[in-house]
Every structure is written in structure tokens, then in C-alpha cells.
Amino acid sequence: MTDRLPRAAIIDGKAIGAKIRAEVAEEAARLSGQGWTPRLVSVSVGDTAAAELYVRNQQKQAEGAGVAFEARSYPQETSLEQLIGILQGLNHDPRVNGIIIQRPLPAHIPVKALQKAVHPLKDVEGMHPASIGNIVYNDLALGPCTAVAAVEILKTLPLKIEGLDVTVIGHSEIVGKPIAFLMMGLGATVTVCHHMTRSVAMHSRAADAVFVAVGKPGLVTGDMIKPGAAVIDIGINRVDGKTVGDVDFASVAEVAGWLTPVPGGVGPVTVATLMKNAVLATRLQMEHYRDAYAKTDI
Ligand SMILES: NC(=O)C1=CN([C@@H]2O[C@H](COP(=O)(O)OP(=O)(O)OC[C@H]3O[C@@H](n4cnc5c(N)ncnc54)[C@H](OP(=O)(O)O)[C@@H]3O)[C@@H](O)[C@H]2O)C=CC1
Ligand SMILES: Nc1nc(=O)c2c([nH]1)NC[C@@H]1CN(c3ccc(C(=O)N[C@@H](CCC(=O)O)C(=O)O)cc3)C=[N+]21
């Protein structure tokens, strides 16, 4: 056959992340000059192996962006009450501008109760119910980093998002659901698949763009993709000591128009987005503080 499609263009997440980080560094320097150096605190509880790489990358990128970063680790047996107390302490500490609760948490800790305990102005992951509500209203201040990163990557492609047929595979609160809302807000027609979907392939094959966030290596294969479609692989899995996504890279690269690699795709853009949120949160807190001060000054 001579009509074989060219291989997918591989999207450079590192370059997209670096561009975001350069803008963040500029804004962080400006805030520092006003005495408001952005400061991010990461909270991990129990076995942190799954989030370890993420935390390490956050630390590295924070240094490069002029954001102060502190990684805190608490033992597995820490109670919900103790953790809420710790978060309240961080909420009230004016030197702390952003709080990130690393997942997964131990089974006895309900993640929602913790997310609710983070002050919305310090919620750099966009996971407080108030932040999630803002996505539904299409009013995005601090958006969930991974979802925002995945959508920002799609926006770099020469595709018209209005009316685009998009399939999201995975519907977690932290990734799949917010992606679906963000894409709806941009005018796409969105289909969401999960573990009870009868035929994921039927929906993915109909899409101009596919987002995958499940956590199963090799879940999406070339025969599930419409020729020329964009494929954004959010999955991060360890297989034989290597990091891989949810996409079977070799077969999907043969049919897709664009594809994000893992590593080097969504991951670096997620971390850059977290830094962007940290700087934005700092600016919001500075303004909030100044407004409050102005009021008492009258
Ligand atoms: N690149 C990055 O920056 C980030 C990457 N990740 C990675 O993304 C992946 C997903 O993370 P997260 O959303 O937190 O994971 P969750 O485990 O919370 O969610 C997985 C989702 O996949 C769905 N699912 C499970 N099996 C199937 C299937 N066979 N077909 C279709 N859908 C299925 C589940 O549906 P149901 O609920 O119905 O079972 C669920 O909605 C992981 O690999 C994680 O490491 C996560 C955060 C950031
Ligand atoms: N509250 C919370 N939010 C998260 O978003 C969250 C979390 N908890 N817990 C863990 C998972 C995983 N995750 C990663 C993000 C970026 C990279 C990343 O930057 N990866 C690089 C390096 C990979 C490598 O070198 O192996 C890349 O993809 O290029 C990795 C993993 C966020 N998660």
C-alpha cells in the first residue's frame, strides 16, 4: 500500500513545560521583589513510593522557577485529625502559599476530607470542592494541574477545538473528570469512558483527540485510534524499571497524527503547571492581604 500514513508527530512535553516555567520564573521574581517569594509545601503520608518521582521533579522544577519548596513526609499511622491539624497550621502560616497533598493516601484517610481542609487560596492542585465547582462554571483560577496540562498540550496543536470530538478514557476526580469539563468549556463534544464502558475502542476510534488516564500500560493500541487523531497519554506506570504510559507507543505512533511520549510528555507540563498555580496563588494571597489591609486602614 502506498497510502500509508506518516508516523505521528511526537509532542515535546519538556519544551512546553520549559516555556511555561520561563514565564513562571519571571512572575516569581517579580513577586519575590515585593517580599512575596512563592512557597510550596508538599504533604506525603505513608508509603510514598508512587509519588516519590513526582515530588523529586517538583523539587527540581521549583528550584528552576524561583519557587521555594518544602517536602514533608508523615508516617502511615498519622490520623485524619492530626493531618487536618497540620493543614490548618499551613493554612494559617503566611509564609506558605501553596499546599499539595500527594496521592495515594493510606486507606484510612479519606482524600476528600483532606482536600476540603486546604484553604481554597492555597489549593494549588485545584482539588478543593470550591475549585472543582469553578471548573463546572468554566471559571478557572487554580485548575487541577494534570488536567490543565493535558488540555494545554492539546491546545498547542493545529486543531480547532470547537466541535472537536474528544474521548476521555478514565474518569477520576483528579484527571479524567476535570479534562472532560475543561474540554466541554472549550466547545468540544466529549465522551467519557470508564471501567464499565462496553467498548472503549468504539468511542476512542470515533475521536479526533483521545486523552488516556487509567494507569494500565498498553491499554490503548493503534487499532483503537482514528488515523491522524491526537493522543494525549497521561498514564505513568513503572514496568521493568522503566516509566511507560497507558498507550502502546509503537502501534499508536503508526496511526495517530500526534502523540505524547512517556516520559517527556504530560509529566513535565503537569509539574510546570503546578509551579504556575503556586505563583498565581501567591499573587492572589498578596492581593487578598492588601485588600484586607486597605479596608482596616480607612
Ligand atoms: N502525568 C501526570 O502528571 C499524572 C499522571 N497520573 C497517572 O494517570 C493515571 C491515572 O491516574 P488517576 O486518574 O489518579 O487514577 P485512578 O485510579 O484514580 O483512576 C483511573 C480511572 O481509570 C478508569 N478505568 C479503569 N480501568 C479501565 C479500563 N479498562 N478502561 C477504561 N477506564 C478504566 C477507572 O474507572 P472506574 O472509576 O470506573 O473504575 C478510573 O476512572 C495513573 O497512571 C497515574 O499515575 C496521575 C496524575 C498525574
Ligand atoms: N495529588 C497528586 N497529584 C498528582 O498529580 C500526582 C500525585 N498526587 N501522585 C503521583 C502522581 C504521579 N504524578 C506524576 C507527575 C509528573 C511526573 C513526571 O514529571 N514525569 C517525568 C519523568 C518520568 C521518569 O523519568 O520516569 C516525565 O513523564 O517525563 C511523574 C509523575 C503526579 N501524580
Image (spheres, helix red, strand yellow):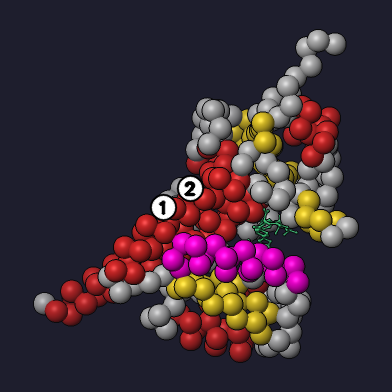
Near mark 1 (Cα within 10 A), the count class, few <14, some 14-19 or many ≥20, is few
Residue range of the region highlighted in magenta in the rendering: 49-67
Farthest residue, direction front:
64
Farthest residue, direction top:
2
* Amino acid type, mark 1: Glu
Q: Is residue 61 magenta?
A: yes
**Residue 26 place in picture, x, y as percent:** 37, 57
Disc 2 + disc 1, Cβ < 8 Å: yes
Image quadrant in which you'd find residue 54: bottom right
Q: Is residue 230 magenta?
A: no
Q: Is residue 172 visible?
A: yes
Q: Look at mark 1 in the image and give the residue it sits on.
A: 23
* Image: 83 above or below 121: below
Q: Look at mark 2 in the image and give the residue it sits on.
A: 19
**Residue 152 place in picture, x, y as percent:** 53, 44
Q: Which element is circle 1 on?
A: helix
Residue 292 or residue 53, whichever sits in front: 53
* Amino acid type, mark 2: Lys
Query: Mark 2 to mark 1: distance in Å?
Result: 7 Å
